[in-house]
Image (tube, grey):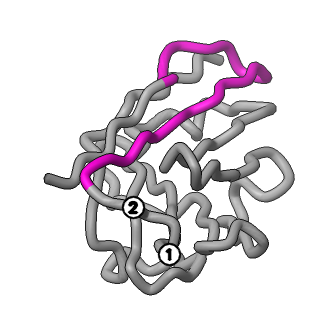
Amino acid sequence: QVQLVESGGGLVQAGGSLILSCAASGRTFSTYGMGWFRQAPGKEREFVAAINWSGDVTRYADSVKGRFTISRDSAKNTVYLQMNSLKSEDTAVYYCAVTSTGLSSSRYGNYNYWGQGTQVTVSS
């Protein structure tokens, strides 16, 4: 059974940092792309960042470019999201997901499996 479990969310002041982790289990994801999405209250889920299967291609939403960094450890089936210079508008539930395309895709529909999400709250 495939499971994606996010961790690392919490409450942080504006300007602070957090590192999110997502551990995948149930199969090997070394050929899968991995991504992060987020959903704020009353808004649709939106793309944040993604990394391809080999870890050498990344993609970011314009709103987080230069502040967030995605990385992966394929040996551990884990993807990370380093979030710096956090803003109140980054407050959301953050979800990790994996895509069998192997690409660093920003398309919601390309992702096959999703985690349950972790809350990130940035206080101003």
* Amino acid type of the residue that numbered disc 2 sits on in the rendered structure: Thr
Seen from the viewer's position, the closer of residues 112 and 109 is 112
Instruction: Reply yes or no: does residue 20 show up in magenta.
Output: yes
User: Please, which residue is most extreme toward the right here?
Assistant: 66
The image quarter in which residue 19 lies: top right
**Residue 28: percent from the left, percent from the top?**
39, 61
Q: Residue at x 51, y 66 (%)?
A: 30
Seen from the viewer's position, the closer of residues 39 and 23 is 23
CB atoms of marks 2 and 1 within 8 Å: yes
Q: Is residue 121 above or below residue 61?
A: above
Q: Which residues are magenta?
A: 8-26
Secondary structure under tag 2 reads: loop
The residue singled out by tag 1 in the image is 31
Secondary structure under tag 1 reads: loop
The residue singled out by tag 2 in the image is 28
Q: Is residue 117 above or below residue 111?
A: above
The disc label shown at residue 2, or none: none
Q: Residue at x 71, y 53 (%)?
A: 64
Q: Residue at x 48, y 50 (%)?
A: 77
Q: Is residue 65 left or right of residue 12?
A: right
Seen from the viewer's position, the closer of residues 112 and 64 is 112
**Residue 108: percent from the left, percent from the top?**
37, 74
Q: Is residue 120 left or right of residue 72?
A: left
User: Please, which residue is most extreme toward the bottom here?
Assistant: 101
Q: Residues within 10 Å of mark 2 (few under 14, many from 20)?
A: few
Q: Residues within 10 Å of mark 1 (few under 14, many from 20)?
A: some
Q: Is residue 91 above or below residue 25?
A: above
Seen from the viewer's position, the closer of residues 63 and 27 is 27
- In which quadrant of the rendered image does the C terminus lie? top right
The image quarter in which residue 43 lies: bottom left
Q: Is residue 56 above or below residue 122?
A: below
* Alpha carbons under labels 2 and 1: distance apart: 8 Å
